[in-house]
Amino acid sequence: MCLSVALYVGFYVLTSAAGQTESAPGSSYVAAVYEHHLVLNPEPWVPLSRPEALRHVEKNLQIYEEQSEKAAQQGAQILVFPEDGLHGFNFSRSSISGYLETIPDPQQENWNPCTEPGRHNNTEILQRLSCMARRYNLYLVANMADLQPCPLTTSPSSPCPSDGHWQFNTNVVFRSDGQLVARYHKHNLYFEEAFDSPPQPEIITFETPFAGTFGLLICFDMLFQEPTVTLVERGVRQLIFPTAWMNQLPLLDSIQFQKAFSLGANVTLLASNIRNDHLIMTGSGIYTPFSATYHHAQRGDAEEGRLLVARVPVLDPLGAGHSVTQEEGAVRKEFTSSADTDSGYQGSCFDSSHPENTSAVSPSMLCDPFTFVLLNKTEGKLDVCHGDVCCHLQYRQSQQQGGTKELYALGAFAGTHTVNGRWALQVCALVRCAGLESSSCGQQVEEAETKMDFLLEGTFGTRHVYPSVLASRYVLEQPGYLEKTADGRVTMKHSNMTGGLVTACLYGRMYHLDNE
């Protein structure tokens, strides 16, 4: 995604409701993702024998088999299952041993596990997945645990683990005839004691006859430069994203960031998540820059899996990162409010034309010290700065008659997030506060009644800005207008919301500062 041109696109269509998809003209294919309510090992810290581990995996493989058949019946040409979907979570390095298989490198060896099961020992899981792909005539992507012996010599920068082998969190891809065609080892681990990060980041793609090239990543990878940026940099427009994503409102809910990434990077994203209420895991989808078919469980929903199938357009590889800023479809309301400015710049962005806002507050949002200014009127203009990012908002609120009073705030943050990971950010976010006190701004909120016509704008020191609009009860809205200029200014305009606004966000990633 380190592209030399802007990352924003115009939209052929607008998607207005969850679960509805519209396609752009041109060639297309049918994709499927499965949100999996997996059968867990109740004692993952206790090592299992190989037969015991296979008996556990078989329970999840049976579900995969059922969903593969359903996907094929709906015409799916590619089906994606989630991260950790066969074995589960919270293993130690030793306790996962019964689940490990040594996965051959498809770049070095052609192998069809279904038709040649005797070539490699202890590959029962690979064989089952291969035969599913072959039986249902679809490309199949799954995630499993890989054991790889260390080479005879290793470099000081990537020494062999003390037990003499590497263990990787791994995506495998099978062609529709069952041949293993891709293997990707997760680079950015998230508290995964059982696994190693590969000695070097892997940039793995595979080809299909129906949609060309797909690239592979896993969960936490999406937040970092490798492999994600490099894949997009190389013109890969279709990304496969198995994940076990723990939702973090108000900025990093699963579907919120999946859609934001698809839109900001100008790619198709096939995202398959785990469903686990205890771990706050739900949210999967099939996203293009101009459409979304997705599922996000609501509080109180039955804890069960969900198959999503959608026809999506094949994106032109030459369009990676190309900018087409335009506004199509319904006529959009322009912001011509004559209301007074609510507040002005502060700190390093203070100037005499915008008097300092004395009501600015600084609660944290996702553990980052945002600077907030409150929306104290039903319409107006606001500016807020934090460090070297400044955010501007024009807005008009509309609330249902007799509805609950709700407080909103405009927040800015520039700095390095350091809790449960380290990544550098510049963020502009309009959020509904959890209560009517300023201290509640930045807390988790799932529902809202207040609709908002708004223009949110920021000037960023990065090309990598991911825009999102999240409405009440986990409904995604397609921004009505996006623009990025050469000087780093990003503008997102939206109106005619279908539900109350939870979050509108411009999430800028300063990849080049992550290690400083």
Image (tube, helix red, strand yellow):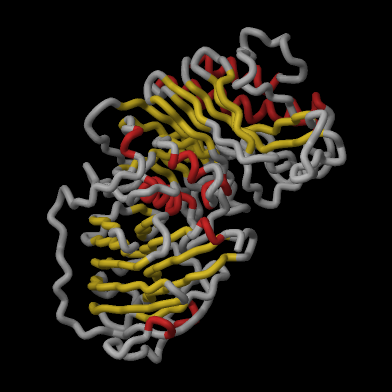
**9 or 348: nearer the eye?**
348
x then y, percent, for residue 108: 64, 19
Reply above or below: 404 against 312: below
* Residue drawn at 34 percent across, 49 percent down: 5
* Residue drawn at 56 percent across, 46 percent down: 221
* Residue drawn at 51 percent across, 79 percent down: 363
Q: Is residue 107 visible?
A: yes
* Residue drawn at 49 percent across, 60 percent down: 510
**29 or 41: nearer the eye?**
29
Q: Quadrant of residue 398?
A: bottom left
x then y, percent, for residue 252: 49, 58
- Counting every numbered tag in the picture gives 0
x then y, percent, for residue 481: 24, 56
With 20 as the anchor, is 163 left or right in this view?
Answer: right
Reply above or below: 460 against 99: below
Q: Quadrant of residue 56?
A: top right
Quadrant for the C terminus in the image? bottom right
Reply above or below: 451 against 352: above
x then y, percent, for residue 25: 22, 31
Q: Is residue 274 visible?
A: no
**383 or 257: nearer the eye?**
383
**499 or 381: nearer the eye?**
381
With 283 as the anchor, is 401 left or right in this view?
Answer: left
With 252 as the anchor, is 37 left or right in this view?
Answer: right
